[in-house]
Image (cartoon, helix red, strand yellow):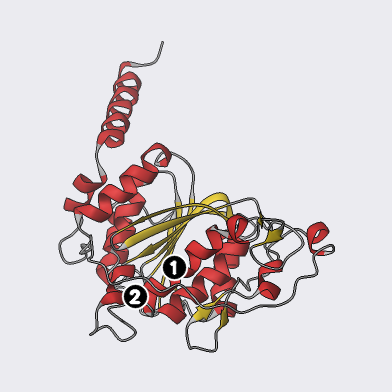
Amino acid sequence: MLPRNAETTSWTEEVKAAMEKTVSINQLAQGIEPSLRSDKSDHYFNFYSDLFESQRQLPLGILEIGVFHGGSTLLFAQYFREAEILAIDINDPPQAFFDELVRLGLSDRVQFARVSQSDPQNLMAVVERHFADKQLDLIIDDASHFYAETRSSFTTLFPTRLREGGTFVIEDWGCGYWPTWPDGNPAGTDGLPRLIKELVDVIALPDRTCQEDSKRVLPTQMQLPSPIRRAVITGSIAAFVRSEAEMPGPELLFVDGPDGGSTTGLRELLRSVPAAFRASARPRIVRFREWSGRMGRRG
């Protein structure tokens, strides 16, 4: 039988743990120090809760790209209670962020590094230094919200650092419809809407390379698997889940088309399939126009 004080301590810890499990991400957000608090709305919190509530007690490996004052990092560290988190940004968060990590007892599993998302070599070095060979479970890109920079971090990390079944989240992609945004376009042909549409094309690789009326939709000798298993796309936030399809390099399916838009190049595309399949595939390299959607309202 345990001593009474040991019993009391054990019971108190169990009650505390049980209460922490029931606290929603929305409630946790309200407890963040106001000067550091993220400007994320309930729309974002509900998105993360819907996708990750069942995983919040697991020892996940999480990379957060773009942290500003660090409020979202503090939130995720409390929501994912067993996660190891690396937060990166091109600027240091304020000292108050590091003080809060210590006060909340999070400094042993939350680290910060200053690096640019558009610097693949240094980005990979920082991730490898922190996580070693461990594959990531969740990558959250809340950094520049620009096409080139976000595509760079996606093509660098999604193929090589995200585990099968892991999720890559792109936040605030809807700002690419704003005419005042640096690479925005109300037609959605530039900025992050362009990247989201490109990734939808990647998801559709099996349909785009299937055989139809004795001919393949694209001139390949085989149906190609997609490196993206599924996607969840809502207003302003999108998530892409990694499939088992091999992607041996950071290059991922993109070449620039003659019309200034984006297309998918089969040479790069074939790098995403297993070597045994690549050996038998002899496609002609083609270019085709990117589908351009109509302007839509943000959710």
In the displayed structure, 132 sits above or below 174; it is above
Can you say which quadrant of the picture contains the C terminus?
bottom left
In the displayed structure, 209 sits above or below 253; it is above
Precedes in sequence: disc 2 or disc 1: 2
The answer to which image quadrant residue 279 occupies is bottom right
Residue 157 located left or right of residue 139: right
Residue 27 located left or right of residue 20: left
Q: Give the residue type at disc 2.
A: Gly
Residue 182 on image: x %, y %: 31, 86
Residue 52 on image: x %, y %: 39, 44
Secondary element type, mark 1: helix
Frontmost residue, 187 versus 183: 187
In the displayed structure, 250 sits above or below 205; it is below
Residue count near mark 1 (Cα–Cα under 10 Å), binned few <14, some 14–19, many ≥20: some
Can you say which quadrant of the picture contains the N terminus?
top left
Q: What is the spatial separation of the Cα atoms under label 2 and label 1, in whole angstroms? A: 9 Å
Frontmost residue, 227 versus 75: 227
Identify residue for label 2.
Answer: 188
Marks 2,1: beta carbons within 8 A:
yes
Identify residue for label 1.
Answer: 197
Q: Give the residue type at disc 1.
A: Lys
Secondary element type, mark 2: loop
Name which residue lies at 24% across and 41% down. Answer: 24
Name which residue lies at 20% across and 52% down. Answer: 42
